[in-house]
Image: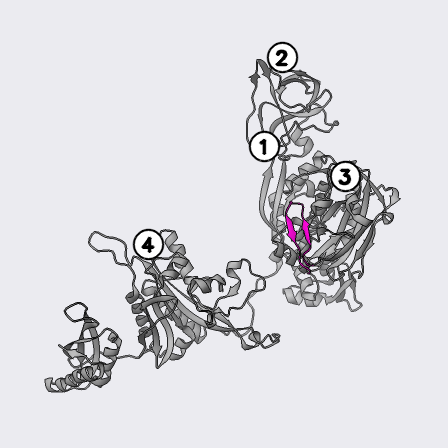
Amino acid sequence: MLVPMNWLSDYVDIQLDPHELAERLTMTGAKVEAVRMIGANLRRIRAGRVLSATPHPSSGRLRVVLLDLGAKEAPRRVVTAAANVAEGDVAPVALDGARLDDGTVIGEAELAGVRSEGMLCSARELGISTDASGILLLPPDVAPGADVVEALGLADTVLELEITPNRPDCLCMVGVAREVAAVTGSRLHMPVSEVREADGDAHGLVSVGIEAPDLCRRYAARVVGDVSIAPSPLWMQVRLRAAGVRPISNVVDITNYVMLELNQPLHAFDCTQVHGGGIIVRTAWAGERITTLDDVERELSPEMLVIADSDSALAIAGVMGGAASEISEGTRLVLLESANFARQSVWRTSKSLRLRTEASSRFEKGLDPEIVPAALDRAAALIGQVGAGKPLHGIVDSYPAPATRRFISTSASRISAKLGLALSRENVASCLERLEFPSELGEDGDSMRVEAPSFRGDVREEIDLVEEVARIWGYNNVPARVPAGSMSGGRSPLQRLAQKARQILASAGASETLTIPFMSPLDFDMMRLPSDDLRRNGIAIANPMVDEASLMRTTMVPSMLASIATNVNRRNLGVCLFEIGRVYTPSEALIKGVEIGRGMTPANEKSVLIGGMAGSISEPAWHTPVREYDWFDAKGIVEALLSELGVDGAAFVRSSLPTFHPGRTACVVLGGAPLGVVGQVHPDVAQAYGVPLHTTLFELDFDALATLCEESRYSPLPRFPAIERDVAMLVGREASAAEVVGLIRRVGGELAESAKLFDVYEGPQVGLGKRSLAFSITYRAADRTLTDDEVNVVHNAVRNSLANELGAVLR
């Protein structure tokens, strides 16, 4: 919300410096984002009355204009190409050394042999509008020689406010002025709306029928005759421009001016295009179409509210008018609309049509229905004031269910207790009355009955009054106290485990990411999931910000791949990331379509740990070859994580999953139950997400992992020496090293302390479909020194089992 100080001062006396006022407003909840200066570049722009305008002696397209700059100065000569200046006009002239709005410095110049002592200015050069079609003509009452910047109020200070959704009343000048008055103790001056009505009655020309009272709470109309479409007065153009609105024409500018002044959007129809003279507020017909003011034809749906006549829709209620009934230069009879539409209806329509306007942004926050006729009167008064038309007698007002007055019971003692202050009833009443909350005091000397004004729809309960008192009394005056009572809390077991996992993964060189828990329906196909995969059952979000995040995620793979792609695209050549998050699947009640009631949940949540790596594992160096992350790095991180968390016995079982590369994927299994997956992503998936082909992921069920973790136990250094034996064998390629290690540990029993793979060979020397594996086995007893004979017995048993159970050919 842009608030020009010159405009704001019409409604409240401002004695504070703009920056001080911004600080005071911010401290009461109306946050000021910035304080801007406009028109600060303009220098030496004077008003000149045209004494003569004659053709240039040697150029057919130029004219020589002689200007009167006041009695104390000699006339100045200016050469211009503009054709819209004539004797008697008053125009702005930039003299030698002047500076325009864009910073351009003007000097004297010779044009086709004639000396020009300055330059006549258009509206664009003064920063009033984008119109550069001709010289800006000033009001005739501007005296020659006057400073144009001062006369038109072009230099101004603008406050940029961030208005929260619960305070739509502050989306207008009067609303901000009301806040300033409450903060500073000044008096609020409401704009005057003295309508001089012409002969004729609006009721005889227009009727209003509301067929959807649940979507349109109030609709009022005025009729203006003898309309003359022209540019709006300069003072209005300057104010609109400072508030961020582009001037268009007098009638349209007045509707925008009133919207910014009173926070009530208005719309002007060419009354001759309203067939039958009747306004009908209804929902759209199925397949109904309308061409809006932006010249786009839009198809409407039956849940959208429209303003229509007897033939067709004229406007999309609360969003945008239609081109068929727009104001044009030939318009002579205008119908002014002021209405109050249901906020949800306008929001849904705006979102569905992807059409957001100043009006829709206000309606969707909820506006005051009581301001509807006042805004019409204000617009009619301005139309008469600037000579744009003559308002006819009366307002056609349809208000099926008038709003009732809202009263809230409270007491000074309860408000004081909530704030930790000792406020008297007079203190509380004073704070509320400054915000236009009248109150009735009870006979007990403490209780109060407060009426919430219609423009404050956000105030409905006693706690809302507490907040209002606090911000007017001053947050700085509320003492800071530490709450008394016992303190409890701390991390849950799952949170403690997550913290430990983060430390382990960070020590392994991984960085943590944090992504939003949403995904796109397109992700399922990009991940190559079959049509019957349960992960396709995502929960749709009712109001997604973008289509790419319209589902609650059922897997964290898309999030991780997107993070890797972002890093790679920004030239991070080595990426190793992890995230602990949640995935969501629909609950049984949601699948069956049962209405979700108290105590029910629409989703089943599960904690997941995912990691991903791609690119170089280290930076290039002259003494070290570059190596890229691969499947074994991911497997190693998972093994280290499980080991540190006290999870023993996990196996990596070769698997084939659609998202991962065939032959480079393993499921993590513990006790026959799946715990997760480690694998290189499928080339098609890598291409779809824009990540390197060798990108590797691991994903673990973190909730299941939490039930398997054991506390670390102390093991003393071994007292007795170990004996090592090597074993080499030929096995089929389908036999994994993990199977061999498992067999060695099982047969070797307590004496087989470890078995480590130290050599792998595949090639023509071992035969097709075979490979050579070599292991180093460590034997040790906890209570004695082993003899060679004891070790030989166990080692031979291991060799025999390898030959008999795995078909290994020992070497």
Label 4 to label 1: alpha-carbon separation: 48 Å
Q: Which residue is mark 4?
A: 573
SS state under label 4? loop
Q: Nearer the viewer, mark 3 or mark 2?
A: 3
Instruction: Measuring from the top left, give residue 282's x and y in whole percent.
Output: 75, 57
Q: Which residue is mark 2?
A: 57
SS state under label 1? loop
Q: Is residue 439 left or right of residue 537?
A: right
Dot 4 or dot 3: first in sequence order is 3
* 294 falls in the magenta region: yes
Q: Nearer the viewer, residue 565 or 779?
A: 565
Which of the 4 image quarters holds residue 439?
bottom right
Q: Decide: few, some or many residues near mark 2? Use Cα within 10 Å; few <14, some 14-19, many ≥20.
A: few
For residue 101, which numbered disc appears in the image? 1
Label 2 to label 4: alpha-carbon separation: 71 Å
Q: Decide: few, some or many residues near mark 3? Use Cα within 10 Å; few <14, some 14-19, many ≥20.
A: some
Please state which amino acid type lies under the numbered disc 3: Thr
Q: Nearer the viewer, mark 4 or mark 3?
A: 3
Most prominent secondary structure in the magenta stretch?
loop
Residue at 60% in and 37% down = 38
Marks 4 and 3 close (CB-CB < 8 Å)? no
Marks 2 and 4 close (CB-CB < 8 Å)? no
Marks 3 and 2 close (CB-CB < 8 Å)? no
For residue 331, which numbered disc appears in the image? 3
Please state which amino acid type lies under the numbered disc 1: Asp
Marks 1 and 3 close (CB-CB < 8 Å)? no
Quadrant placement of the C terminus: bottom left
What is the total number of numbered labels drawn onto the structure image? 4
Please report the bounds of the magenta region as a residue range: 286-302
* 561 falls in the magenta region: no
